[in-house]
Image (cartoon, rainbow, N blue to C red):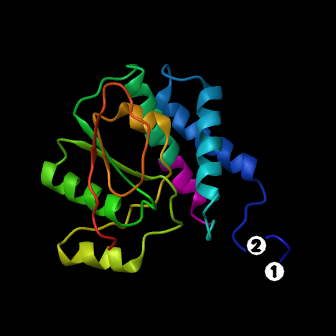
Amino acid sequence: MTEKGMFEFDDLEGVLRRVAERLDDNFTGIFSKETIERYVKESYDLLAVNATVTVHLPSLTERFAKDRLRALAQYETKIEKDKPSILFVCVHNAGRSQMAAALATELSSGRVEVRSAGSAPSDSIPQNVHDAMQEIGLSLENAFPKPLTDEVVRASDVVITMGAGSISAVPGQLLGGHIAPTP
């Protein structure tokens, strides 16, 4: 093995540029290439802070940047919101908020856009959280801890904090707090 870790990228700039190119297809006419590239780089940096395994960072970066750009476009009314949105926030975005997001998605039958985030996100979702959701027939297979970002908060109609401490109130948002026990 080299001095670089087994899962580090020789051409990170190239990888992130290709991610930005793919996202540019989704946001042509909405955001400039420079804005998309900046969001991709920033999203990568935000996720990399807590990453212990980096092999999936490019794909997670793409999903996270896409969600952030969609939220920004909604907030700036560059794209229409076709359904109400809820954001669940907890400290690590690895338990309560992920479970609440999965339950809200299931119970709304897709009629609500549901997001989750953490004020200090973990590197992964613990197996006991996956197991608990499997017991009720829900999967967190595609879920991953994400940091709380301004555009996601602003694009949300309702923000529910779940023991995440305080987040700044945003005009137009309904903030609700609920302390749920740590799973």
- At a point 68% along the width and 50% down the height, the residue shown is 15
- Residues under numbered marks 2 and 1 in contact, where contact means CB atoms less than 8 Å apart: yes
Left of 83 or right of it: where is 8? Answer: right
Which secondary structure lies at badge 1? loop
- At a point 73% along the width and 52% down the height, the residue shown is 12
- At a point 54% along the width and 32% down the height, the residue shown is 24
Front-most of 99 and 112?
Answer: 99
Left of 73 or right of it: where is 138? Answer: left
In the picture of the structure, the residue carrying the numbered disc 2 is 5
Q: Amino acid at mark 2?
A: Gly
Q: Amino acid at mark 1?
A: Met
Front-most of 164 and 29?
Answer: 164
Picture disc at residue 1? 1
Residue 70 can be seen, yes or no: no
- Relative to 90, say whether 155 is above or below: above
Left of 29 or right of it: where is 111? Answer: left
Picture disc at residue 14? none
Within-10-Å neighbours for mark 2: few <14, some 14–19, many 20+ = few
- At a point 31% along the width and 31% down the height, the residue shown is 173
Where residue 44 appears, as percent x and y from the top left, is 62, 50
Q: Which segment did they paint magenta?
A: 55-63
Where residue 64 appears, as percent x and y from the top left, is 49, 47
Residue 48 can be seen, yes or no: yes
Q: Is residue 57 magenta?
A: yes
- Residue mark closest to the camera, 2 vs 1: 2
- Relative to 39, say whether 136 is above or below: below
Q: Quadrant of residue 20?
A: top right
- Where is the N terminus found, in terms of image quarters? bottom right
Which secondary structure lies at badge 2? loop
